[in-house]
Amino acid sequence: MLKAAFMFIAPGANPQQHRSVIQTPAVELTVVGVKDYQDAVTVAKELVASGIGAIELCGGFGHEGVAKIAAAAGSGVQVGVVRFDTHPGLEGKSGDQLF
């Protein structure tokens, strides 16, 4: 079974509270919200320690944010990205501009 995660970034998100697990026969998907890149790095490390093998990031993560998560996850974890140049949920900005 693939253990994967989708991490989204939103003002005021609390990774302990804003988290859900969806289980299908083939994939266990953990969805978790974070408030900034610092939270995201911490959560990425926790996810990897729990056996997550793939992390997809929402479009709010800019290039710098993606690099931080890829470094935190390590070389054995696939990191993918939904891409927006600017994100509608972050007042039309990239996370790189905000964090």
Image: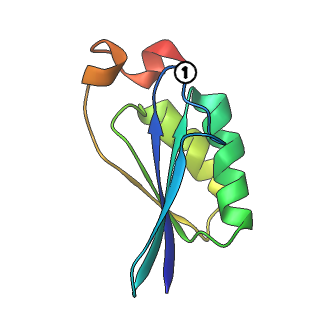
Is 88 drawn above or below residue 62 in the view shown? above
Q: Which residue is mark 1?
A: 12
Q: Is residue 86 in view?
A: no
Q: Quadrant of residue 75?
A: bottom right
| Residue at horizontal 58 percent and vertical 45 percent from the top | 69
| Residue at horizontal 49 percent and vertical 87 percent from the top | 1
Q: Is residue 21 left or right of residue 74?
A: left
Q: Looking at this view, is 61 or 43 the one in front? A: 43
Q: Quadrant of residue 86?
A: top left
Q: Looking at this view, is 97 or 21 the one in front? A: 21
Q: Amino acid at mark 1?
A: Gly
Q: Is residue 46 left or right of residue 88?
A: right
| Residue at horizontal 40 percent and vertical 86 percent from the top | 26
Q: Position of residue 95 (x, y in %)?
A: 44, 23
Q: Is residue 31 in view?
A: yes
| Position of the C terminus by quadrant | top right
Q: Count all numbered tags in the image, as a single digit.
A: 1
Q: Secondary structure at mark 1?
A: loop
Q: Position of residue 19 (x, y in %)?
A: 55, 48
Is 12 drawn above or below residue 41 in the view shown? above
Is 78 drawn above or below residue 59 in the view shown? below
Q: Position of residue 56 (x, y in %)?
A: 42, 55
| Residue at horizontal 54 percent and vertical 41 percent from the top | 18
Crowd class of label 1 (few under 14; some 14 to 19; many from 20; radius 10 Å): few
